[in-house]
Amino acid sequence: MARPRFWDPEGRRSGGIPTYPWKMAPDGLLTRRQLRAHGLRPNGQDVAAQLMWRSRRSKLGVRVAYLYRPDLAAPVRPLTEGRRRALAAANTARRTCPQCGRDAGYVLPAHLGVCLPCADGVPLAA
């Protein structure tokens, strides 16, 4: 039986990092997103392995997800009140239209830079 394209558990072809195809990761290793779901962060540890898969979204045609050991991970740092205020201010700025000055209630589309009514040229009802 032929091995999948990205099967390299010894890391010979991928710079010393054990590599596995999509959905074939060994038990006990987690991605950053999976660590976060468990309330953990990588804590500066080196990548234990990686997942690779073909993707049309990527310019290179291949995407990678790094895997970490949860036993070396640390708890996520709690959000301080100052950071919470800064995050709220940044999110408000992303929703505020620079043209009409109102909170659109959604993050403004980056390609427009203004709220949808302003982009369409529709005057706001007062």
Image (spheres, grey):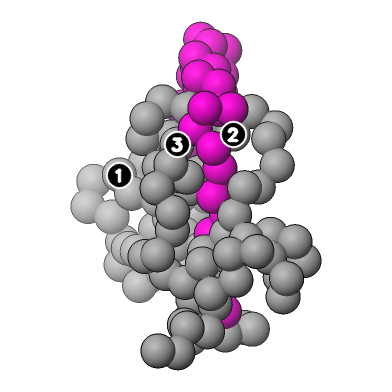
- The image's mark for residue 54 is none
| Of callouts 3 and 1, the N-terminal one | 3
- Comparing labels 1 and 2, the label whose residue is closer to the camera: 2
Q: Position of residue 15 (x, y in %)?
A: 77, 66
Query: Residue sitting at 36 percent across and 35 percent down?
Result: 37
Query: Residue 83: horizontal and vertical position, in percent?
Result: 56, 19
Say which label, 3 or 2, has the lower sequence index: 3
Q: Quadrant of residue 92?
A: top left
Q: Amino acid at mark 2?
A: Pro
* Residue at the image position 57 percent from the left and 59 percent from the top: 50
Residue reaching furthest to the front:
1
Q: Residues within 10 Å of mark 3 (few under 14, many from 20)?
A: many
Would you call the spot at circle 1 few (<14 residues within 10 Å), some (14-19), or many (20 or more)? few
Q: Residue at x 70, y 32 (%)?
A: 44
Q: Residues within 10 Å of mark 2 (few under 14, many from 20)?
A: many
**Residue interval drawn in magenta:** 62-91
| Residue to which mark 2 is pinned | 42
93 relative to 55, above or below: above
- SS class, disc 1: loop
Question: What residue is shown with label 1?
Answer: 105
Residue 16 seen by the camera:
yes
Farthest right residue in view: 15
Q: Is residue 98 magenta?
A: no
Question: Closest to the observer: 41 or 101?
Answer: 41
Query: What SS does tag 3 mark?
Result: helix
For marks 1 and 2 on the same chain, the one whose residue lies earlier in the sequence: 2
